[in-house]
Image (tube, helix red, strand yellow):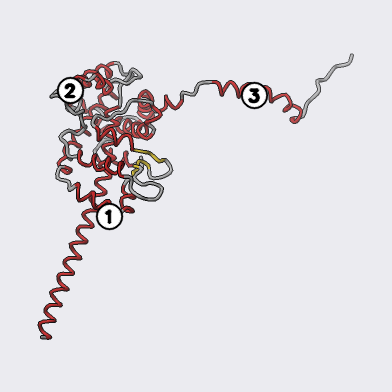
């Protein structure tokens, strides 16, 4: 009996039958909804990333249980954040109780969150007596200097957290939140800001991954300063001295809108149903504007010292010239 052997086909011959299958798969992929960007930078994504990093790297031994020293446990930690409005604090507590995080991570995060805000509040007097008008004129006098100052790589957020002594689970949260701020438009969330100055700064804050990082589009194509954006920068500079670390909505007819506005619920509960990181995003933006102002103050003082030295040299030269003229007479 004859045995039939199947004919083999060359790779070139096989490719003739592949295109229909490829086209079918391609159409299926193109028709599928793309929600990866929405999930990646949402509040739920921050929770998942923090959990992954915590499990991978472990906890910090030196600050693993800061909540033990706070009366009332995590409820006391939330109450210690005086910049949280009443409704926001209640919603935050409810969200924390339903959080998928283990209790130890929750307390680490809230313990260091309180610590960071308290340390930043202690620095507020450094900005109360700023010569804003002088700084404004200084910026306008040196555009190249201003261009170099208004930029901040995202990696510096990690350095700031270490400077403030934050190196537990909350450090991982801030790193994830800084990436969330850099891609905030993709989340489709409502603006985080409260005051007009904060909302305007949030609107014009940009992130350039391949360039300066966080920045403001202060210059047009011709290299001239965009007045509207520059005024936003100056406006935020005026708010750094307080009275609150995180600004509140302006009162209308003597009523504090933050205590009665239902939008404050976003401070404690995300649209995803878990904890919200709105307050942390506002802190990140505050760190950015503070960094720029600190850099500007260093340049401003250097310029003032240089001008003072030059003035002293000119005075000495003038005195020597006068002495020489007296002798010659």
In the rendered image, the residue lying farthest to the right is: 1
Question: Mark 3 vs mark 1: which is more N-terminal?
Answer: 3
Q: Nearer the viewer, mark 3 or mark 1?
A: 1
Q: Residue at x 74, y 30 (%)?
A: 11
User: Which of 151 and 51 lies nearest the eye of the viewer?
Assistant: 151
Label 2 SS: helix
Q: Are marks 3 and 1 in contact (CB under 8 Å)?
A: no
> Horizontal placement of 51 versus 324: left or right?
right
Position in image of residue 296 (x %, y %): 25, 49
Labels 3, 2: front one: 3
| Numbered badge on residue 141 | 1
Callout 1 crowding tier (Cα within 10 Å): few <14, some 14–19, many ≥20: few
Above-or-below relation of 295 to 80: below
126 to 112, vertically: above or below: below
Q: Residue 307: which quarter of the image?
A: bottom left
- Rounded to the nearest whole Å, what is the CA distance between mark 3 and mark 2? 59 Å
Quadrant of the image containing the C terminus: bottom left
Residue 73 location (% of width, % of height):
19, 21
Q: Which residue is mark 2?
A: 76
Most foreground residue, 35 or 216:
216
Compare marks 3 and 2 and give the one earlier in the sequence: 3
Residue highlighted by disc 3: 23
Identify the element where label 1 is drawn: helix
Q: Residues within 10 Å of mark 2 (few under 14, many from 20)?
A: some
At x 35%, y 50%, the residue is 224
Q: Are marks 2 and 1 in contact (CB under 8 Å)?
A: no
Q: CA distance from mark 2 to mark 1?
A: 49 Å
Q: Nearer the viewer, residue 247 or 40?
A: 247
Q: Callout 3: helix, strand or loop?
A: helix
Instruction: Give the mark, 2 or 1, whose residue is nearer the N terminus.
Output: 2
């Amino acid at each position: 009996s004859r045995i039939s052997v199947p004919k083999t086909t060359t790779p070139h011959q096989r490719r003739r039958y592949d295109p229909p299958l490829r086209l079918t798969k391609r159409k299926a992929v193109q028709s599928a909804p793309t929600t990866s960007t929405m999930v990646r930078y949402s509040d739920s994504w921050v929770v998942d990333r923090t959990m992954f990093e915590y499990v991978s790297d472990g906890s910090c031994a030196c600050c693993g249980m800061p909540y033990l020293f706070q009366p009332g446990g995590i409820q006391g930690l939330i109450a210690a954040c005086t910049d949280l409005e009443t409704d926001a604090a209640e919603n935050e507590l409810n969200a924390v109780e339903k959080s998928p995080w283990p209790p130890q991570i929750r307390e680490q995060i809230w313990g260091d969150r309180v610590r960071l805000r308290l340390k930043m509040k202690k620095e507020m007097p450094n900005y109360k007596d700023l010569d804003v008008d002088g700084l404004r004129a200084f910026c306008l006098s040196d555009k190249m200097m201003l261009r170099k100052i208004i930029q901040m790589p995202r990696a510096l957020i990690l350095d700031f957290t270490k400077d403030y002594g934050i190196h537990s689970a909350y450090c991982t949260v801030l790193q994830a939140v800084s990436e969330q701020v850099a891609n905030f438009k993709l989340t489709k969330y409502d603006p985080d800001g409260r005051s007009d100055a904060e909302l305007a700064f949030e609107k014009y804050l940009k992130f350039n991954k391949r360039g300066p990082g966080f920045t403001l589009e202060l210059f047009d194509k011709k290299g001239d300063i965009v007045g509207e954006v520059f005024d936003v920068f100056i406006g935020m500079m005026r708010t750094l001295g307080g009275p609150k670390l995180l600004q509140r909505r302006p009162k209308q007819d003597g009523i504090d809108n933050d205590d009665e506005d239902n939008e404050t619920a976003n401070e404690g509960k995300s649209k995803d149903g878990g904890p919200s990181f709105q307050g942390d995003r506002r802190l990140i933006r505050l760190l950015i504007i503070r960094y720029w102002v600190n850099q500007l103050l260093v340049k401003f003082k250097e310029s003032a010292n240089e001008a003072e030295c030059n003035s002293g040299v000119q005075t000495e030269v003038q005195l020597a010239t006068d002495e020489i003229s007296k002798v010659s007479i």
